[in-house]
């Protein structure tokens, strides 16, 4: 019977760090933009969809708090799941008309949103790795 434990190399943990840092940093730009400019437009879209506009404040969790947790590597998996849910809501709320469209250069019109979503899912599955506050198998990772 083969062992189910995996040998993790420093490059595995470095890859996790790079993935975490890239996802978190890029999402934080969106979060900071909403901190500066507000989220009124999100509340309006939610209200138009029949949801309470106050749910718009959850975008701060998905685009500020969760990315900060991912960046430092604490509660990484749950934070990545929050980001994934945030992206699914954004896709459904804002981008449904673009699901099957291409951009001007022939790429998928939602490639950025798709990359955020898939990266968040990857981080949720992989965890933070040892280059994190939580540590590879730490209590908070």
Image: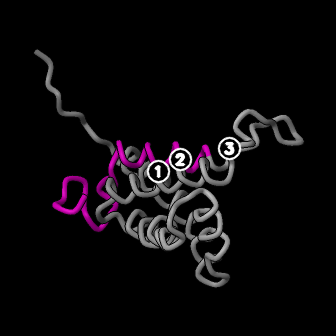
Q: Which residue is mark 2?
A: 117
Other-residue count near label 2 (Cα within 10 Å), few / some / many at <14 / 14–19 / ≥20: many
Q: Quadrant of residue 104?
A: top right
Direction bottom: furthest residue: 36
Residue under numbered circle 3? 96
Task: Single out the residue that lies furthest toward the top.
Answer: 1
Q: Residue at x 61, y 75 (%)?
A: 39
Between 133 and 90, which is closer to the camera in this rendering? 90
Crowdedness of circle 3 by 10 Å Cα count: few (<14), some, many (20+)?
few
Please say if the residues under marks 2 and 1 sit with CB atoms less than 8 Å apart: yes
Quarter residue 50 falls in: bottom right
Q: Give the numbered dot on residue 115.
A: none
Q: Earlier in the sequence, mark 2 or mark 1?
A: 1
Badge 1 crowding class, 10 Å Cα cut-off, few under 14, some 14 to 19, many 20 or more, is: many
Q: Which residues are magenta?
A: 114-141
Marks 3 and 1, the one that precedes in the sequence: 1
Q: Is residue 27 above or below residue 85?
A: below
The local secondary structure at tag 3 comes to: helix
Residue 94, x across and y down, in percent = 67, 54
Q: In terms of sequence position, does the residue under pointer 2 or pointer 3 come before the other? A: 3
Q: Is residue 31 above or below residue 140?
A: below
> Would residue 37 appear left or right of 58 to someone viewing this image?
right
Q: How far apart, in angstroms, are the residues tagged by discs 2 and 1?
A: 5 Å
Q: Secondary structure at mark 2?
A: helix
x and y, in percent, of residue 71 in the image: 43, 66
Tell me what residue is drawn at x 25 percent, y 64 percent. Answer: 134
- Across and down, in percent, residue 29 comes to 62, 71
Residue 1 included in the magenta stretch of the image: no
């Amino acid at each position: 019977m083969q062992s189910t434990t995996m040998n993790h190399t420093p490059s595995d943990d470095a890859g996790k760090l790079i993935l975490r840092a890239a996802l978190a940093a890029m999402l934080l730009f969106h979060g900071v933009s909403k901190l500066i400019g507000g989220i009124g437009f999100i509340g309006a879209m939610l209200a138009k969809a029949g949801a309470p506009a106050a749910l718009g404040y959850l975008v701060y969790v998905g685009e500020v708090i969760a990315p900060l947790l991912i960046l430092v590597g604490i509660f990484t998996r749950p934070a990545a799941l929050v980001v994934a849910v945030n992206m699914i809501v954004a896709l459904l709320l804002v981008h449904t008309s673009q699901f099957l469209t291409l951009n001007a250069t022939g790429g998928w019109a939602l490639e950025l949103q798709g990359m955020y979503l898939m990266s968040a899912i990857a981080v949720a599955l992989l965890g933070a790795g040892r280059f994190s506050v939580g540590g590879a198998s730490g209590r908070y990772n």
